[in-house]
Image (spheres, rainbow, N blue to C red):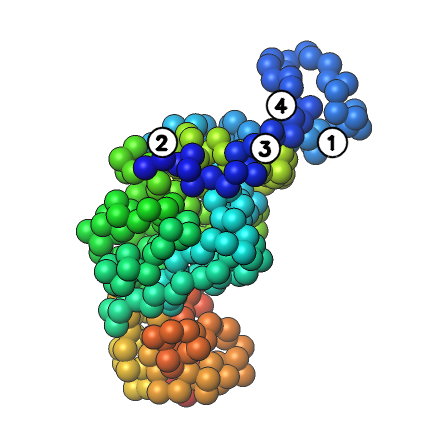
Amino acid sequence: MSIQNLIRPIIKALKPYSSARDEFQGATDNMVFLDANENPFENGVNRYPDPHQRTLKAMLSEIKHVSTKNILLGNGSDEVLDLIFRAFCEPNQDNILILPPTYGMYEVLANLNAISIKAINLDEAFQPKLDAILNAADSNSKLLFICSPNNPSGNSFNTKVIEELVSKFKGIVVIDEAYIDFSNEMSWISKLNTYPNLIVTQTLSKAYAMAGIRLGICYASKEIIRVLNTIKPPYNINELTQKKAIELLSINDLALNQIQDILKERDLMISELESINFIFKIYPSDANFVLVKVDDANKRYNQLIEKGIVIRNRTTQPGCENTLRLTVGTAQENKTLLSTLKTL
Ligand SMILES: *Cc1c(COP(=O)(O)O)cnc(C)c1O
């Protein structure tokens, strides 16, 4: 498969904006920087941030066992996903494939970029329908979004089915691994060299406890990363975000311990939810949330709001009638949820 043939002609012809910090890279000790019209008085943020986020990428490279050349960072996954649309999808011409119920941003970004959507619903077990997906694809189908573990259902998709999709789909396959750190499944990062059309996205927003700094991560072939680098805003990751990510990633044990705590709490939560008489089904979860089917999702949602507990009502999503999505919180928060559910 030639990635070059998938890139929009207008993007292939682009020259990236060359920022001041691009034109000179080198030793920083004792250098005098008079190139970017910055205010020279140091306050921690008076200089432009590193446009290539070298230190942060080096840390991610070590944690995830992947070369820095295979990494692109974005202002949240949202920016990463938007860059992918802009690189590969011709407005008013191309289409994407999504597998509902799924993460809402794929549809939002498709609409924003004037790209049509082919939706192939997951089956009753929330697994992708391989043949239906491949049959739905046409020569303008540029992106296939696979969210695994899936939001809002919580389950991971069958590895063999994903493998078939990645090897048979003729466009780019984006595997959204926002919840992979809660799962025992392998990350598809390890298959980047096998599948040139594979893009894996992750985020610091969930397991790594940094939703507030907005840092999304894209892993792909050097060829794809080069294209996305050409079109990203030069200083898309601000200095505060880079500093905070470096600080918290350097105590990586912290996140790993928190993930273990969250998983323990999730299993406890699931066993307690089984005793709630209006919960009919608890879906298997590979993530830090649990989807449950109840008697009347709107009613239960409103009852919880009245008690000061906010969960997510997913009842309008395909295949999710009367479902609620519960994020696993602290032990105390989960206790509050469970005791409140018992009183309803
Ligand atoms: C939460 C979430 C993200 C994270 O998005 P950010 O913009 O990085 O915070 C991405 N994909 C899915 C499926 C999610 O649930």
Q: Which residue is mark 3?
A: 14
**In the rendered image, the vertical position of residue 293 relative to residue 231, given as above or below:** below
Residue that mark 1 sits on: 46
Q: Residue at x 46, y 87 (%)?
A: 299
Question: Quick one: label 1 or label 4, which is nearer the N terminus?
Answer: 4
Q: Position of residue 291 (x, y in %)?
A: 35, 70
N-terminal-most mark, 2 or 1 = 1
**Splitting the image into 4 quarters, where does residue 151 fall?**
bottom left
Whole-percent x, y for residue 41 in the image:
79, 26
- Foreground residue among 336 and 107: 107
- Residue 289 appears in the picture as rendered: no
Query: Are there few (<14), some (14-19), or many (20+) residues within 10 Å of tag 2?
Result: some
- CB under 8 Å between discs 3 and 1: no
Q: How many marks?
A: 4
User: How far apart are the alpha carbons under marks 3 and 4?
Assistant: 17 Å
Q: CA distance from mark 2 to mark 4?
A: 23 Å
Is disc 3 placed on a helix, strand or loop?
A: loop
Instruction: Name the residue that disc number 2 marks.
Output: 66
**Of discs 2 and 4, which sits in the foreground?**
4
Name, please, the residue furthest toward the left: 160
| Of callouts 2 and 4, the N-terminal one | 4
Task: Examine the image and state in which quarter residue 261 appears.
Answer: bottom left
Gap between marks 3 and 1 measured at Cα: 30 Å
